[in-house]
Image (cartoon, grey):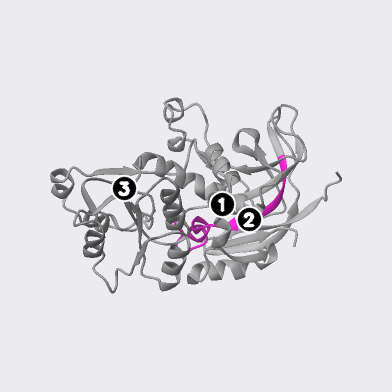
Amino acid sequence: MKLPKEMQAVIFEKIGAHKLVTVPVPEIRNPDDLLVKIEAASICGSDLHILADPPGCIAVPGTVIGHEMVGEVVETGSGVTGFCPGDRLVCDPNISCGRCEACRTGHKNMCENLHIHGVDRHGFFAQYACIPERSAVKISPSLSKEQAIFAEPLTCVMSAVDKARLLPGETVAVIGAGPIGLYFLSLFRVNGAGRVISVEPSEYRRKYAEKMGADAALDPKKQDAAAEIRALTGGRGADVVVDAVGMCVADALRYVCRGGRVVLFGQNAAARETICQNDITRNEITLFGSYIGPYTMSATVKLLESGLIDFSKMITHRLALREFDEGLAAMRSGTALEVVLDPFA
């Protein structure tokens, strides 16, 4: 396959600014490199943080942004053993060093030297990308790109769901019905939740929560969500509560039952909350923090290939890479859930 010498890509230019540019097609430089043709990439909430002013996540100027992708291998490095040209894959964009104490004790998501595609390594809002073989997971030729594109964010949620250890029949409340909240409620549903409750102020997103399987979608601006959750659970509260927003731990503690579990997943470094520690102690509530998904990508691919959940229902925008600004604006305005970009359209 003869490759072009140049390609289109969206780069982080400076704080609050990005640009669609023409850059050289990347070349294999390491024995374990895979050169991948990007079938699809999607805009994530993290990309909004990178492009905000001030930014919620600092990227390196000149870096191709984007960390969610589906691709096809076009070339392999001399040391690659698990992939051949023509293989399709998804990618874990978080590259751990394997040498620090966190990596050596099984916590590579806490790596002291973590590098991330789309932040400090070139990402996937482009036509081609180079990734290390260890970051790639092979997918079936029959898995549609509109399902496979959910692999990266979904694997992070899979890791958090694993920590919650849901028992069949338990009640779950998910705070937030953006993409992450919808992944949570969908996964808890197929994991045997007896009831899944969404708490979301946006009517647009509440409708999507119901579409993705929520038994109830509560508006915390118009309803006493804690009272409604107790009413739905015989006065107990939810067995598991997820904060998919990043600033709702106080609400989560009001929604959860005695002896319940709270999963803190959403991130907002600027948020500050006041809670009563005694509420946690007296009610024996267990709190989990969960950051990215270090060992769940293979399981996530199996889920997507199983067809148990149709995540493509969450795609609201299908755009060409050159229409990135349109997708970004829709994400910022809250009128989009999943924006999928085709680099070759």
Q: Which quadrant of the rendered structure holds the N terminus? A: top right
Asked if residue 257 shows in the view, the reply is yes
Q: Nearer the viewer, mark 3 or mark 1?
A: 3
Any mark on residue 146, and which? 2
For label 1, the crowd category at 10 Å Cα-Cα, with few meaning under 14, some 14 to 19 and many 20 or more, is: many
The three-letter code of the residue at mark 2 reads Glu
State the quadrant of the C terminus. bottom right
Residue at x 66% of width, y 66% of height: 319
Q: Earlier in the sequence, mark 2 or mark 3?
A: 2
Residue 224 point in image, percent of width and height: 23, 68
- Residue for point 45% across, 48% down: 190
Question: Is any atom of residue 324 visible in this view?
Answer: no
| Residue at the spot of label 1 | 150
- Are dots 2 and 1 in contact, CB under 8 Å? no
Point out the stretch of residues depicted in magenta: 35-56
**Which amino acid type corresponds to the residue marked 1 in the rendered image?**
Phe
